[in-house]
Amino acid sequence: MHLEMKTQCEKCGSALPPDGEAYICSYECTLCPACTLNVQGICPKCGGELIHRPRRKVSLERSPGRSELSPQTTERPWLIWVVSFGVWTFIALAASVAIYRYDLAAGTPMSFLSEIPLELSRLFTYAPLTPFAFGLALRYPLQRENWLRRSLVLLAGGIAFMVAHVILRGLTYPVWDWGTRGFVSAVWDSQTHGIRIRPELFLRVFYANSIEDITGAYLPIVVVAHAVSYYRRFADRELRASQLEGQLAKAHLQALKNQLQPHFLFNTLHSISALMLTDVRAADRMMSRLSDLLRISLESDGIQIIPLSQELEFVNGYLEIEKVRFEDRLNVVFDVAPDTLDALVPHLLLQPLVENAVRHGISRRSSNGEIRIAASHQNGSLCLKVGDNGPGIEKSISSQTQTKTGLGLRATKERLQTLYANEQSMEIRSAPESGVEVEVRIPFRTEPRQLVYEVAQADFGAA
């Protein structure tokens, strides 16, 4: 399979020649060695591990006569030769055992060790011809649209295989001569000890072995080659489907993140607009802090996974804006375990949860409000909690209304499902004392790893 290789570093824009050194993640994000070193081997876009990209040794363009053999066949031609001689050796040994037992049952036993050289010399003539027949069948596999033309090609190959085997057989194996009533060589005269080519003996070999050459050797080789060819095509389609699924997941994640960024920005600008008529200085402080948040957001554009410490820094900047709005009415409590600060989390994971707590919890209180943010490591999972002491979930509304969520929570749920599949959970419940608490659990990861996406195609359609 020939994949399109990226020719520019996605971080610095430098050129990446096809045969040069580059690094890719599981989503085919491509970086140059210098940028890979700067980001410490972690993809700045999806958080996956950056690994060496295979170097292309041939041109990407296909010429009309280019071989369709797979890279395994073209890069390791010796393998098929080893397999060919190994298989025919096994067949020769099996044939030696069968003939030895037959002679033993017929009452004309021969030494087993004397049977082996005879069968090896008889069947080894197929071994050097097998790679060529196998390669021809791989090069011209039968398909629905070209079966007739390629059948003629394979037929011609079968005739060439048969003729070549007759020649090799006549050169290496004795032929029965009715005149002398014994086995003689078709090219060597034992009496004169000189070369003597006898065409009638080659013709006798042809009559005796032509059917066996086609049905017993060439046809099985072609069948095996077609089985290998179809398997590789199937594996190729599976790989393409997997890569397409990864690209769809990447695009889906970025679309969800792009929904969250303007959502957060519009809500913040709305809060600033509300203060402009009552407290211009407070609105100016909010604008200043908002510019800092936008700078952080632009620096992480396209990045999906970041350490929890950076996510908390972003959330704290957002809360500083809200503190200007609520003044002393907003109190924030962080309960973050030190060993969780390096854990990898989706960017903009906590901000929609905190914003939801402020809008539906703190803003509805006339007295002081409190936002609680906690992070802990529990049994291989990262547990994140965002709670408030607002009015809580109203019992008067129907259960159907309770299940409805805003854009921020809905996009957050979809991102978690896309990134972690069944390894994540998100629960919205009433807090122990008052208010609402949102608990998110994701796999605890502190080292760069390739993310495994277990997203069915139906999930994208539903999203």
Image: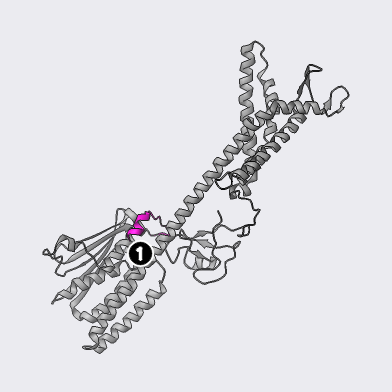
Q: Amino acid at mark 1?
A: Pro
Q: Which is more toward the observer, 149 or 460? A: 149
Residue 373 visible in the shown view? yes
Q: Secondary structure at mark 1?
A: strand
Residue 201: quadrant of the picture: top right
| Image position, residue 228 (x, y; %) | 55, 42
Question: Can residue 444 be seen?
Answer: no
Residue drawn where x is 34% and y is 62% of the image:
415
What is the basis of the colouring in this image? one colour
Foreground residue among 322 and 123: 123
Q: Is residue 387 above or below residue 363?
A: above
Magenta part of the chain: 446-463
Side of 339 where 9 appears, left or right: right
Q: Nearer the viewer, residue 123 or 305?
A: 123
Which residue is farthest right? 192
Question: For mark 1, what is the residue?
Answer: 346
Residue 70: x and y in percent read 58, 49
Asked if residue 188 is positioned above or below residue 287 in the image, the reply reads above
Is the stretch drawn in magenta largely helix, strand or loop? loop
Q: Residue furthest left?
A: 396
Q: Is residue 308 above or below residue 290?
A: above
Residue 452 on the magenta segment: yes
Quadrant housing residue 219: top right
Q: Measured from the top left, where is residue 332 in percent x and y?
A: 23, 72
Residue shown at 68% from the left, 33% from the top: 126
Q: Toward the viewer: 312 or 247?
A: 247
Rendered residue at 43%/66% (across/down):
45
The reply, left or right, for residue 47 in relation to residue 139 is: left
Residue 429 position, x and y percent, is 19, 61
Residue 49 part of the magenta-drawn span: no
